[in-house]
Image: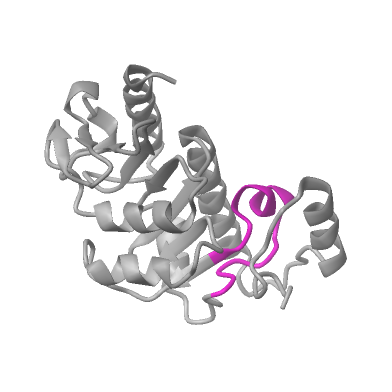
Amino acid sequence: MTETKLREEICRLGRSLFERGLTPGSSGNISVRVDDGGWLVTPTNASLGSLDPARLSRLGADGRLLSGDAPTKEVPLHSALYETRAASRAVVHLHSTHSVALSMLPEIDPRAALPPMTPYYLMKCGATALVPYHRPGDPAVAEAIRGLAGKYSSVLLANHGPVVAGDSLEAAVYAIEELEETARLYLLLRGLNPRYLSPAQVKDLSDVFGLGFPDDGHGHG
């Protein structure tokens, strides 16, 4: 996909996420890797609902701003995911309500923030890690991501929101939407003793679709 098309895609999908209430105000950010090793990223203080393709921040492979507006302060977060997940081409970070709520619950397992609830959650997100709270833009957030050693494509930042890496922008958007819906299901069912997928059902999905779970995700320790 050409850089022009990528710029349009970032704006189109950003608007879609915003209009459906998945990230309010000027929250959330999106980045996409381009062929020269640099990236396109949404600017600081920009609403995903009204992005201008020409004003997206264009960073070189060294992270320096080449053109466009100043980038989001969450650049280190995106950078850490690209470093540890070399196949990733896009990263999406939102402040979606149910995922943020999930990240604040005391019972959440940091190695598997959600249980194996639905096949599509496992197929699109795998297991989701929870990392401790750090101030937005704090380099410690990036260090926490690096500490996961690339085992997770979906991560919850405590009291802050989800961040997902994908092999395309569309894949990352679909995965973060699936994460949000699964967090919503978890909150709806909390305390009702729901029936989750069994280890055998999880293994079947993993075998058929080639899913790779971290050793400690979903009871595969």
- Residue lying at 73% horizontally and 68% vertically, measured from the top left: 194
Q: Nearer the viewer, residue 66 or 181?
A: 66
The residues colored magenta run 111-128
> Looking at the image, is 59 positioned above or below residue 202?
above
Could you say where residue 10 lies in the image, as x and y percent from the top left? 35, 30
Could you say where residue 213 lies in the image, as x and y percent from the top left? 67, 63
Asked if residue 78 can be seen in this view, the reply is yes
Q: Tell which residue pokes out farthest to the bottom in this image.
A: 106
Q: Is residue 26 magenta?
A: no
Q: Nearer the viewer, residue 62 or 47?
A: 62
On the rendered structure, is 188 left or right of 49?
A: right
Q: Quadrant of residue 46?
A: top left
> Looking at the image, is 72 positioned above or below residue 191?
above
- Residue lying at 22% horizontally and 69% vertically, measured from the top left: 135
Could you say where residue 130 lies in the image, as x and y percent from the top left? 47, 70
> Looking at the image, is 106 positioned above or below residue 142?
below
Asked if residue 97 can be seen in this view, the reply is no
What colour scheme has been applied to the protein in the rendered image?
Answer: one colour
Q: Nearer the viewer, residue 197 or 97?
A: 197
- Residue lying at 54% horizontally and 81% vertically, measured from the top left: 107
Q: Nearer the viewer, residue 50 or 140?
A: 140
On the rendered structure, is 101 left or right of 73?
A: right
- Residue lying at 68% horizontally and 49% vertically, measured from the top left: 123
Name the quarter where the N terminus is drawn. top left
Name the quarter where the C terminus is drawn. bottom right
Q: Is residue 124 magenta?
A: yes
> Looking at the image, is 113 positioned above or below residue 182?
below
On the rendered structure, is 96 left or right of 124?
A: left
Could you say where residue 76 lies in the image, as x and y percent from the top left? 27, 57
On the rendered structure, is 166 left or right of 24?
A: right
